[in-house]
Image: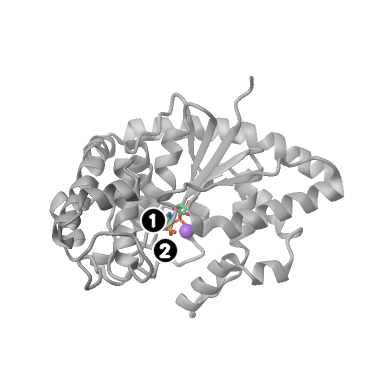
Amino acid sequence: EKKQIAFSAIQPSGTITLGNYLGAIRNWVTMQNEYNCIYALADLHTITVRQEPAQMRKNILDAYASILACGIDTEKSLFFIQSHVHTHAEMAWVLDCYTQFGELSRMTQFKDKSAKHADNINAGLFTYPSLMAGDILLYQADKVPVGADQQQHIEITRDIATRFNGLYGNVFKIPEGFIPKNGARVMSLQDPTKKMSKSDENVNGCVHLLDSPEAIMRKFKRAITDSEAHVHYGEGKDGINNLMGIYSTITGLSFEQIEHDFEGKGYGDFKTAVGEAVVEELRPIRERYESYIKDKAYLEECYRKADEIALKISSRTMNKVMKKIGF
Ligand code: ADP
Ligand code: NA
């Protein structure tokens, strides 16, 4: 039986967060045995926001090494760099012409990002979803492992693909989002009503994949909770709910089991336990990252190989699309 195809990508903009890891990358790793996995560093997406060239070059390599360190096995999975594979930019242009202004205007990420970058609301920021749709559709992906914040972009990808297929026949596989039950929405430790994000102004709000154990413990100890001092899941307890979600995702314990284990204990004990679980989860990743990042030649060998195969696979879809349109 032929394996299904999983495709996903992450932007190499700054460091990778615990949210990226629990919401997406952790599933990229576990899907490797069951699926034919294709993963990308979506570096073309990052220039929707102004980048400094030298820093960008460094971020790309850092992100590549970090994601390998999470457990992506280049013998099993393709892990390539989007800007190295020219079909992505080509497909984005084609799909731009099959994507409506109205539907792009409804994207909440565009609304959020244009509010945040009011001095640079560029066309790329607006058409970001059709670049992303192309990334996915080029590989005829069945499943797209992402966090909950990407649900709307998965929907528009399906809409664009369905529209194109309606005009030209079955060109694209209609992909499905693969959003985990647990970890899909990790919130800021300082404002648990907002998603954990690398652009959090409060440094204690966001845990980074490569944070030191001391930094991780400090951030969890300072996490915002409530005045109840009773570890249980509930309405109005966003901080505790978030910590329970993180703890549950890492340990595999159910919320009920966590409530039971922390019966009669205060938030201090719980925060320490969550911090320690995160430290242990991230420790081997940080160690592997340290050795990968020293070996630039190895990293280059990995992505060059993957870039080449990605070009070959994606060109099949690209050529088909061009022919269908009449080029
Ligand atoms: P970011 O949103 O941090 O800028 P990306 O847009 O590159 O990063 O997202 C990479 C992946 O991480 C996506 O699948 C996204 O859904 C997921 N993700 C991002 N933030 C979170 C979060 N706070 N909780 C869970 N998943 C997240
Ligand atoms: Na995102």
Camera-nearest residue between 272 and 147:
272
Tell me if 183 is positioned left or right of 94 in this view.
Answer: left
In the displayed structure, would residue 195 be above or below residue 31? below
Contact, mark 1 vs mark 2 (Cβ under 8 Å): yes
Camera-nearest residue between 103 and 126:
103
Q: Picture quarter containing residue 205? A: bottom left
Which residue was labeled with disc 2?
Answer: 51
Q: Local crowd at mark 2 within 10 Å, few (<14), some, or many (≥20)?
A: few
- The amino acid at mark 1 is Met
Give the x, y percent position of residue 157.
Answer: 66, 53
Q: Which mark is residue 56?
A: 1
Residue 94 can be seen in this image: no
Per the model, the C-alpha gap separating discs 1 and 2 is 6 Å
Tell me if 241 is positioned left or right of 38 in this view.
Answer: left
Picture residue at 22% right of the left edge, 45% below the top: 277
Report ligand 1 position as a quadrant.
bottom left
Picture residue at 51% right of the left edge, 27% below the top: 34
The image quadrant where one finds the N terminus is top right
In the displayed structure, would residue 270 be above or below residue 109? above
Name the residue furthest top: 1
- The amino acid at mark 2 is Gln
